[in-house]
Image (tube, rainbow, N blue to C red):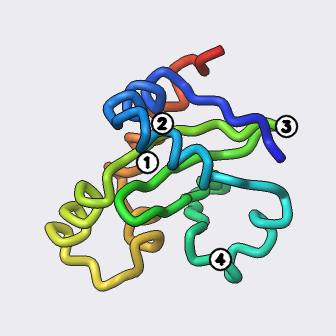
Amino acid sequence: MYQIVFNEISSAELSTLGALEQLQLLDSFKVNQEVLENLDENDQFGKIERNGKVIYRYRTESLRIYFHTEDKRLIVNRVLSKNSLDDFLYRSGMPLSEDEALAQSPHFWKLIDESQQSEPKK
């Protein structure tokens, strides 16, 4: 298992959820090396790549967690509502999967870059 680290932005996004929803989310968010090596076997996880940069996605019914790995840490970049992503995909009109559309979206990568510039919460 990885140590899960939230940066300031993802921590703030998580704090908008109710306490019970936060606990349920964190309880279900179980990531290990085997999961990341076998993404095609679990549709809750995905991988988004651009210019050698890899971001992973964990999907629940209502939320998406975007993260990357660093040493034995899992750095959470963003915690976003499914509705905000559905709205983005609908407006963009891209006939692609969620992960493919995000990989091609400069707006998505801007969100990720912003989060990586914030300090992880300790």
Which residue is denoted by mark 1 in the rendering?
Answer: 109
Q: Amino acid at mark 4?
A: Asn
Horizontal and vertical percent for residue 33? 84, 58
Marks 1 & 4, CB-CB < 8 Å contact: no
Q: Residue at x 68, y 81 (%)?
A: 40
Marks 1 & 3, CB-CB < 8 Å contact: no
Secondary element at image label 2: helix
Q: Earlier in the sequence, mark 4 or mark 2?
A: 4
Q: Residue at x 47, y 69 (%)?
A: 99
Which residue is denoted by mark 3 in the rendering?
Answer: 71
Secondary element at image label 4: loop
Mark drawn on residue 82: none
* Of labels 1 and 4, the one closer to you: 4
Q: Residues within 10 Å of mark 2 (few under 14, many from 20)?
A: few
Q: Quadrant of residue 100?
A: bottom left
Mark drawn on residue 113: 2
Q: Earlier in the sequence, mark 3 or mark 2?
A: 3
Mark drawn on residue 42: 4
Depth check: give the residue in front, 30 or 83: 30
Real-space Cα separation, disc 1 to disc 4, in angstroms: 24 Å
Q: Earlier in the sequence, mark 4 or mark 3?
A: 4
Real-space Cα separation, disc 1 to disc 3, in angstroms: 22 Å
Horizontal and vertical percent for residue 45? 60, 67
